[in-house]
Image (cartoon, rainbow, N blue to C red):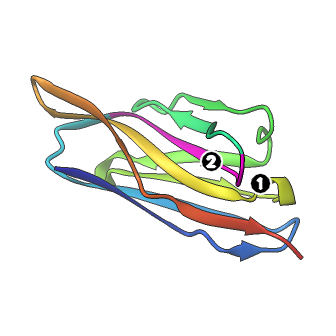
């Protein structure tokens, strides 16, 4: 069984910064793409950023230039550095990973989410 555990969510003032972390644990052979998604109250979940195992990244237009996704493959961990936070960034942030648990077993896993609130 594989689990993703996020941390780092908090209340922060507009213009502030936060770093989210998401660590994968369990029976893992390889982790391919990892990503961060968010869901604001009353809204659909949306992609924030993704990163391949090799480090190629993709960002939502709304966070380009403010957020940076990175990963440490040795630690099975993905990070999201969030700068210049805005009230509209308020949401529950969840990480996602594409896991190869064995040669014949590949699946997606989601974390439980961490709440980021941007407010003065």
**Numbered disc total:** 2
Image point (30%, 50%), residue name? 74
Label 1: element kind: helix
Would you say residue 37 sits in the magenta stretch?
yes
Image point (39%, 32%), residue name? 53
Circle 1 is placed at which residue position?
89
Would you say residue 24 sits in the magenta stretch?
no
- Residue 86 visible (yes or no): no
Helix, strand or loop for the magenta stretch, by majority: strand
Circle 2 is placed at which residue position?
38
Image point (61%, 40%), residue name? 45
Q: In which quarter of the image is residue 100?
A: top left
Q: In which quarter of the image is residue 119?
A: bottom right
Q: How crowded is mark 2: few (under 14 residues within 10 Å), some or many (20 or more)?
A: many
Give me the disc on residue 101: none
Residue closest to the eye, 74 or 39: 39
Image point (16%, 50%), residue name? 1
On the rendered structure, is 71 left or right of 100?
Answer: right
Which callout, 2 or 1, points at the residue further toward the start of the chain? 2
Q: In which quarter of the image is residue 93?
A: bottom right
Q: Tell me where residue 106 appears, x and y as whole percent.
A: 21, 28
46, above or below 120, in the image: above
Q: Give the range drawn in magenta.
A: 32-42
102, above or below 25, in the image: above
Q: Tell me where residue 15 appears, x and y as whole percent.
A: 87, 65
Label 2: element kind: strand
Mark pair 2, 1: CA separation: 9 Å
Q: Tell me where residue 8 appears, x and y as whole percent.
A: 56, 69
20, above or below 63, in the image: below
Pointers 2 and 1 in contact (CB under 8 A)? yes
Residue closest to the eye, 74 or 60: 60
The quarter in which the C terminus is drawn is: bottom right
């Amino acid at each position: 069984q594989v689990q993703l555990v996020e941390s780092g969510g908090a209340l922060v003032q507009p213009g502030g910064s936060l770093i989210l972390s998401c660590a994968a644990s369990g029976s893992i052979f390889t982790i391919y793409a990892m990503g961060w998604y968010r869901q604001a109250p009353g809204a659909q979940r949306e992609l924030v950023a993704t990163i391949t195992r090799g480090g190629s990244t993709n960002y939502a237009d709304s966070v380009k230039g403010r957020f940076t996704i990175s990963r440490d493959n040795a630690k099975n961990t993905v990070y999201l550095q969030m700068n210049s936070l805005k009230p509209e960034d308020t949401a529950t942030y969840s990480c996602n990973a594409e896991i190869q648990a064995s040669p014949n077993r590949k699946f997606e896993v989601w974390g439980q989410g961490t709440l980021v609130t941007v407010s003065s």
